[in-house]
């Protein structure tokens, strides 16, 4: 993540301003390859390393939680220039101020747990 | 082999991410980083207060290893695999950012205005980082995933909920960048 600039705030900003293909290239090529490999797994019934069938669980179909949750996440993603993955890599790279973001992300998760029943899903 | 020490192009990085997702699938796991935030809450005892965190978090310990790996990876990549950490950016973006007040964009990986260590004594910076973190943590759990779980894994599996989530991510991001940044910065 560090090497690909996915953890760089500036590149996330650039992505949302549509001024660079780089981030989109990364995401789309990851999805393209992922799609192909998932299809291969399903078609050839490729087993896991432990010899069992690989199960793909369908996510619950709904709308509100994905859209509202998505928007809230997106706001934070653009503001901090990170999502959970890069937060950890930045920590490893020595950007200790990311700890603030990380701690509050955990808090945000906790807050969700508390208010969950009151939110549309 | 010197290309390793430069920023990696998207056509290397993207496939590498996909390979990680597939590796995890082959180990009967899923690639999803935000679940770790929930696990961390549970590990701190949140399960005793809130039902959502009352689950067998120890079964998720493998995912915490992915986190450990990410931290180590970040350390190795920035200290041993890099001559030049900063990638190139579109000049128009650099100008946009300068208007907002961000200087030195070409030389930094993260904006010093937000992330330099002196932010610990800068209330506005701290506030923004905190609010940003809250939004990410809350939003990711509400949506049931972040970019790794939905954009990468979910879309690779052609899951409609993930598409809705990703659209949401972008709507949120665009609102922040286009409407809120000019107000904030």
Image: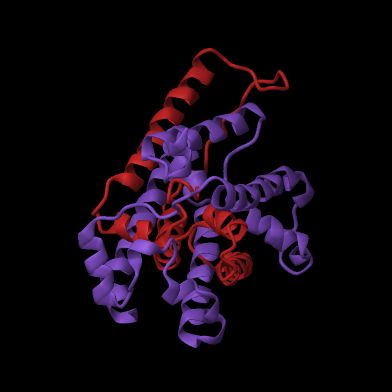
Chain colours: A red, B purple
Residue A14 visible in the displayed image: yes
Where residue B66 sits, quadrant-wise, is top right
Q: How many marks?
A: 0
Q: Position of residue B34 (x, y in %)?
A: 58, 53
Residue sitting at 42 percent across and 46 percent down? B7
Q: Position of residue B39 (x, y in %)?
A: 70, 55
Vertical comparison of B166 with B130: above or below? above
Q: Nearer the viewer, residue B174 or B93?
A: B93
Residue sitting at 22 percent across and 68 percent down? B95
Where residue A26 sits, quadrant-wise, is top left
Residue sitting at 35 percent across and 47 percent down? A23
Q: Position of residue B46 (x, y in %)?
A: 74, 66
Vertical comparison of B83 with B105: above or below? above
Q: Position of residue B18 (x, y in %)?
A: 49, 34
Residue A112 visible in the displayed image: no
**Residue that protrudes farthest toward the left in the picture:** B92
Q: Is residue A88 left or right of residue A15?
A: right
């Amino acid at each position: 993540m560090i090497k690909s600039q996915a953890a760089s705030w500036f590149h996330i900003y650039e992505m949302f301003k549509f001024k660079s293909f780089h981030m989109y290239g990364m995401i789309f090529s990851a999805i393209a390859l992922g799609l192909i490999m998932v299809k291969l797994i399903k078609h050839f019934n490729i087993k896991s390393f432990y010899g069992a069938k690989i199960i793909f669980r369908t996510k619950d179909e709904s709308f509100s939680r994905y859209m509202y949750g998505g928007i809230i996440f997106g706001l934070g993603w653009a503001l901090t220039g990170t999502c959970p993955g890069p937060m950890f890599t930045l920590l490893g790279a020595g950007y200790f101020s990311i700890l603030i973001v990380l701690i509050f992300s955990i808090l945000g998760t906790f807050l969700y747990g508390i208010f969950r029943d009151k939110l549309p899903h | 082999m010197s290309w390793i020490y430069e920023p990696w192009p998207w056509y290397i990085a993207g496939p590498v991410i996909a390979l990680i997702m597939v590796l995890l699938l082959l180990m009967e796991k899923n690639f999803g980083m935000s679940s770790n935030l929930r696990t961390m809450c549970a590990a701190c005892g949140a399960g005793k207060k809130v039902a959502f965190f009352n689950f067998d978090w120890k079964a998720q310990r493998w995912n915490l290893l992915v986190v450990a790996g990410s931290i180590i990876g970040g350390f190795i990549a920035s200290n041993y695999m890099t001559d030049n950490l900063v990638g190139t950016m579109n000049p128009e973006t650099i100008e946009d950012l300068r208007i907002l007040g961000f200087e030195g964009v070409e030389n930094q990986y993260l904006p010093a205005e937000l992330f330099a260590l002196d932010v610990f004594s800068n209330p506005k910076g701290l506030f923004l980082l905190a609010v940003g973190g809250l939004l990410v943590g809350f939003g990711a759990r509400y949506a049931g995933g972040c970019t790794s779980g939905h954009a990468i894994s979910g879309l690779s599996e052609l899951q409609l909920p993930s598409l809705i989530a990703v659209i949401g991510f972008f709507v949120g991001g665009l609102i922040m960048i286009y409407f809120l940044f000019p107000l904030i910065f």
